[in-house]
Amino acid sequence: MRGSFCASDARAQSCSITSVTSVAFGTYNVFDAAARLSSGGIVFECSGVQPSDTVTIEISGATDATVLRGMTAGSHVLRYQLYLDAARTIVWGTGAGGTATYGPVLPADGVPTSVPIYGRVPARQDVGAGAYSDSLLVTLRL
């Protein structure tokens, strides 16, 4: 018995983060009554995607929406949080503990997509002087 079949184009799907702009809060004054706000961003690009493919983005460091992240300088910790929205109400994390992820969204094939990150440092934290920083892992899932 003989049969036939059709072959179709195979396309490799991929997405990558092409740039990240840090969320830099600037100088923190422990006596300021207002929170420090800042923003940054992620740019990603996908290729070989189909119209039904979706992307999500997770940011490490938030396993519970009620617990703030921490930047450190020596033994001092300056608490902060990252958000999906400009109103700073939706905590950006891994999807665990009330945190949310970016997406799912339908990526455009070969088109860079910019995603803003919104940050907030609560006011009047009793911390020592120093250069505070934190390192986070950004995970893009296709």
Image (cartoon, helix red, strand yellow):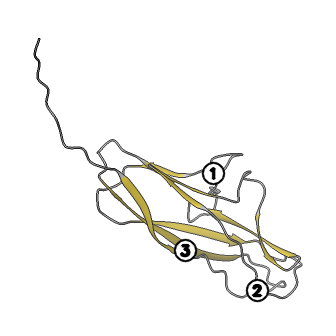
* 3 vs 2, front mark: 2
Percent of width and height locating residue 33: 79, 79
Checking the image for residue 131, the label placed there is 2
In front: label 1 or label 3: 1
**In percent of the image, x 65 and y 57: which residue is there?**
91
Q: Are marks 1 and 3 in contact (CB under 8 Å)?
A: no
SS for callout 3: strand
Report which residue position mark 1 lands on: 94
Q: Which disc, if any, is residue 40? A: 3
Q: Marks 3 and 2, Cα distance to the nearest angstrom?
A: 18 Å
Amino acid type, mark 1: Thr
Mark 2 is on which residue type? Ala
Dot 3 or dot 2: first in sequence order is 3
Give percent across and percent down for residue 73.
81, 80
Quarter holding residue 16: bottom left
- Which residue is more in the foreground, 122 or 44? 44
Query: Mark 2: few, some, or many residues within 10 Å (few <14, many ≥20)?
Result: few
